[in-house]
Amino acid sequence: MTKPVKDQPSDCSPSAIVKALEEQQCHRKGAEARKFPRQFLCVPAVLEIRDHATAPARHASVATNNISEGGFGFIFDAHLKPGTLVRVCFESLPGKPCIKGLVRSSVRICGTQHRVGVEFNQIA
């Protein structure tokens, strides 16, 4: 029989972990508070990427990892310079809605993968 390691957290149920995460999110204040709360959803999307207004468009298929009324995030296999113009189309949604945005952040995660944040231009 093995002894528990001192100061090692004990295992708990998945529902207890989710509840703790939800409570933590409810208590966010100050700089962490968001005008538009994120929804952590994986939604397939097609990007049209323009490095500048006169550049030819590139296209890429991505999946969101979060989305809100203010923008969305996704993982991408290359750095996208902040300020890059994008148009995203959610082809799995009725009417295949599209919206323009600007890359606000592109943080290297590992290898060539980057966590990219886009701010929508057309916020209602």
Image (cartoon, rainbow, N blue to C red):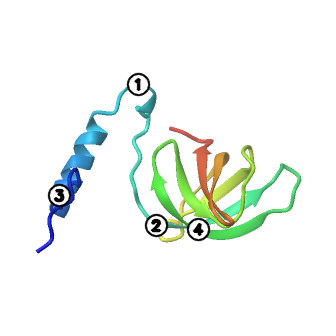
Which circle's residue, 1 or 4, is located before the other in the chain?
1
Name the one closer to the observer, 120 or 8: 8
The numbered mark at residue 62 is 4
Looking at the rendered structure, the kind of residue marked 1 is Gly
Q: CA distance from mark 2 to mark 3?
A: 42 Å
Which circle's residue, 1 or 3, is located before the other in the chain?
3
Outermost residue, bottom side: 1
Residue at the location (50% across, 65% down)?
95
Q: Of the residues tagged 2 and 1, which is closer to the observer?
A: 1
The spot of residue 105 in percent (x, y) is 64, 46
Q: Are marks 1 and 4 in contact (CB under 8 Å)?
A: no
Secondary structure beneath dot 2 equals loop
Q: CA distance from mark 2 to mark 1?
A: 34 Å
The spot of residue 99 in percent (x, y) is 60, 53
Name the one closer to the observer, 22 or 61: 22
The spot of residue 18 in percent (x, y) is 23, 55
Q: Of the residues tagged 4 and 2, which is closer to the observer?
A: 4
Q: CA distance from mark 1 to mark 4?
A: 31 Å
Q: Are marks 4 and 2 in contact (CB under 8 Å)?
A: no
* Crowding near the residue tagged with mark 1, few <14, some 14–19, many ≥20 C-alpha atoms within 10 Å: few
Q: Are marks 4 and 3 in contact (CB under 8 Å)?
A: no
Secondary structure beneath dot 1 equals helix
Find disc 3 in the rendering and name its residue.
10
Which circle's residue, 2 or 3, is located before the other in the chain?
3
Find disc 2 in the rendering and name its residue.
93
Looking at the rendered structure, the kind of residue marked 3 is Ser
Q: Relative to 44, say whether 34 is above or below.
A: above
* Crowding near the residue tagged with mark 2, few <14, some 14–19, many ≥20 C-alpha atoms within 10 Å: few
Secondary structure beneath dot 3 equals loop
Q: Are marks 1 and 3 in contact (CB under 8 Å)?
A: no
The numbered mark at residue 30 is 1
